[in-house]
Image: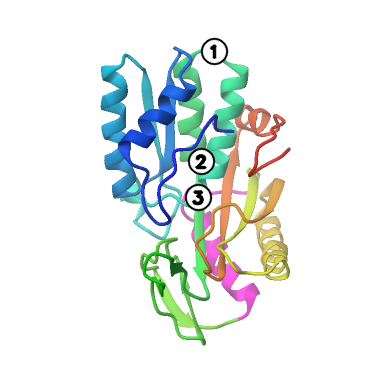
Amino acid sequence: MADAAALGDIFAAPAPNVIMQTTEAVDNGKGVIYIYGNYAGDNMNFDIAAELADDEDIKTHTVRVWDDVASAPLSKIEERRGTAGDLYVLKIAGAASEKYTDFDKIVELTERSRDYTRSIGVALSAGSVPQTNSFNFELPDDELEIGMGLHGEPGVAREKMSSADEVVSKLVDQLCGDLPYQSGDEVCLLVNNLGSSTYMELLIATRQAHKLLAERGIKVHDTLVGNYCTSQEMSGYSITLLKLDEELKELYDYSCDSFALRK
């Protein structure tokens, strides 16, 4: 996994000086990879930090994660947001750093895992903003929003509440049609709690996702269910797929022991 994380306030990017301090803390002379969700504030601040690092002769490379299929069409993939897919990209990057010493090889594998990752979420209630003591969007009790972003960014469809199986079917359809995933593919599946959903809800969604993937001939190599990429108090969940090839599968199976993930 990652060697360190540069932290900002809730719903805010880390400041350039914080990123630079973090960079200096982990640099071993071989290079530092910045991995983060594709948001304007993060992009700006990490770009500034990369310039500061360059002034100190610290080699950096940026991998922006843009796994959220609801946030922009495939033709504009670099405009998509980063969501729970960060977890898979960080897992592969950490394992690649453990196995390889060549910086460019590690970057290539990290970017490949990013390009093979797709996510989409559904919000059932809004998240809260501690600084203002308010919710970051409004959603009636009898509605849900497919594709809602972690910070309240608009989704692709707002509709009346329906069964969990129906909702998951829509999410899986969007995911499988985007890469696209095909019969015979092998994937990792992540069902991520957006904040305040129960494990019962997550496991119901997981069961349906497994069923739908099996019907498409897609094999699930590993499943993660839990709180990995959350938005304070938001009810809902996201589904992420990482398409595996033999190299990515080997790296995914590397053991790790971090706060977020233990394998």
Question: Residue at position x 57%, y 41% from top?
Answer: 88
**Front one among 232 and 80:** 232
SS type, badge 1: loop
| Rendering coords of residue 157 (x, y %) | 41, 74
Magenta residues, start to end: 163-183
> Is residue 214 toward the left or the right of residue 32 in the image?
right
Which label number is shown at residue 116? 2
38 is higher (above) or lower (below) than 30: below
In the shown orientation, is residue 81 left or right of residue 231? left
Q: Is 82 left, or right, of 142 in this rendering? A: left
Q: Amino acid at mark 3?
A: Arg
Residue beneath disc 3: 118
Q: How many marks?
A: 3
Report which quarter residue 252 is drawn in. Answer: top right
Residue wearing tag 1: 101
**Mark 1 Cα shell of 10 Å, populated few (<14), some (14-19), many (≥20):** few
Q: Quadrant of the N terminus?
A: top right
